[in-house]
Image (tube, grey):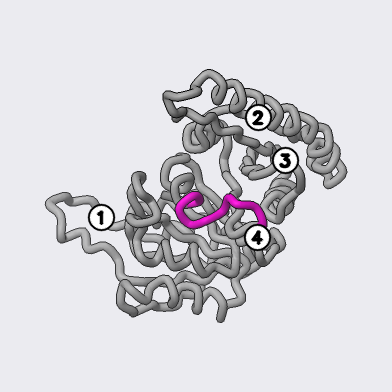
């Protein structure tokens, strides 16, 4: 884990998610880059379009100029924390496109959830989760959690998203003192016409030196998210690893029930991979 990206949803303050990302970067000796996105306004009424466009362009230029002034402050802040490789990037594009392009050269994206700023709802975070193409740590900013990973809970049900999440989280899992595998219903390989053997998560983790404690989870789908958070809380987990299940369009409505509930109610950081 060498390159970490954190979304700067404003240029005025260092948010709890930025502090969390800095903690992860320091643990791994990784580079930390903050991304500020100025989204363009693309829909303009036909009447008074020229005047309105001029005002919009002026406002965008002012926002970008103000964001540029934060670069020196961010770099000084990160350097003072011991993160030598750092940068503050400004992109003028749609958020989804900006995240997807920038994540191409990063190992991890850190996002804030339920922060003081307008950004950070389930729909907004969900859209990025499902389209950025990178593993994400979603940080509930109303809790301001520290970047610890002594105890990690892993939500497991054998689905591809779950496999990808475990694989992506391996650097953190290998550092953890205690890993709790919350084992739900697995995908039955016999329900398909393929002959691909199921992924053996226990053998995979053991191969990489990760010892686990298994905790079964036998609840209905509509209670899965609540149960996952409850077990993670009982284990005093610092982080919950899980797949993000959903579709890329209208993500707030098409999220799987467990994913949506966990995002809405999370009190600990979530390591998620679509």
Stretch of the chain drawn in magenta: 116-125
Mark 1 to mark 4 CA distance (whole Å): 40 Å
Q: Nearer the viewer, mark 2 or mark 4?
A: 2
Secondary element under disc 4, as helix, strand or loop, is loop
Is residue 130 among the parts visible in the rendering?
yes
Residue 178, numbered label: none
Return the disc, 2 or 4, that comes first in the chain's sequence.
2
Pointer 1 and pointer 2: residues touching (CB < 8 Å)?
no
Circle 3 SS class: loop
Q: Which residue is mark 2?
A: 59
Pointer 3 with pointer 4, Cβ within 8 A: no
Indicate the secondary structure of the residue bearing disc 2.
Answer: helix
In the picture of the structure, the residue carrying the numbered disc 1 is 197
Q: Residue at label 4?
A: 141
In this picture, residue 144 sits left or right of residue 154: right
x 68%, y 37%: residue: 33
- Residue 254, image x, y percentages: 33, 55
**Marks 1 and 2, how far apart at CA:** 56 Å
Image quadrant assignment for residue 72: top right
Number of residues whose C-alpha sits closer than 10 Å to that of mark 4, classed few (under 14), some (14–19) or many (20 or more): many
123 in the magenta segment: yes
Q: Earlier in the sequence, mark 1 or mark 4?
A: 4
Of tags 3 and 4, the one toward the viewer is 3
* Residue occupying the point 59% across, 27% down: 56
Vertical placement of residue 216 versus 140, above or below: below
Crowd class of label 1 (few under 14; some 14 to 19; many from 20; radius 10 Å): few
Q: Is residue 229 above or below residue 249?
A: below
Q: Position of residue 247 (x, y in %)?
A: 33, 49
Of marks 1 and 2, the one in the foreground: 2
Horizontal arrangement in the rendering, residue 21 relative to residue 105 (left or right): right
Which residue position is annotated with label 3? Answer: 11
Residue 208 is a magenta residue: no
């Amino acid at each position: 884990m060498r390159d970490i990206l954190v979304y700067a949803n404003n240029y005025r303050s260092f948010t709890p998610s930025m502090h969390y990302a800095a903690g992860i970067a320091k643990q791994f000796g990784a580079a930390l880059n903050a991304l500020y996105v100025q989204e363009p306004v693309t829909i303009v009424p036909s009447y008074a379009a020229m005047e309105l466009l001029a005002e919009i362009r002026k406002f965008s230029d002012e926002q970008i100029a103000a964001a540029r002034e934060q670069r020196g402050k961010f770099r000084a802040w990160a350097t003072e924390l011991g993160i030598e490789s750092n940068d503050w990037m400004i992109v003028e594009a749609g958020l989804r496109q900006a995240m997807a392009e920038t994540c191409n050269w990063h190992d991890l994206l850190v996002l804030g959830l339920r922060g003081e700023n307008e950004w950070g709802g389930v729909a907004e975070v969900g859209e990025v989760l499902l389209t950025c193409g990178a593993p994400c740590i979603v940080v509930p900013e109303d809790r301001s959690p520290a970047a610890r990973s002594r105890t990690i809970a892993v939500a497991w049900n054998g689905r591809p998203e779950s496999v990808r999440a475990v694989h992506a989280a391996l650097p953190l899992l290998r550092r953890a003192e205690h890993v709790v595998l919350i084992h739900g219903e697995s995908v039955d390989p016999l329900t398909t016409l393929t002959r691909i053997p199921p992924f053996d998560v226990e053998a995979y983790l053991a191969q990489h030196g990760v010892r686990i404690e298994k905790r079964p989870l036998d609840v209905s789908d509509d209670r899965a998210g609540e149960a996952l958070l409850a077990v993670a809380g009982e284990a005093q987990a610092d982080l919950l690893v899980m797949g993000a299940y959903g579709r890329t369009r209208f993500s707030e409505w098409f999220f799987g029930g467990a994913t949506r509930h966990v995002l809405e109610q999370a009190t600990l950081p979530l390591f998620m991979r679509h």
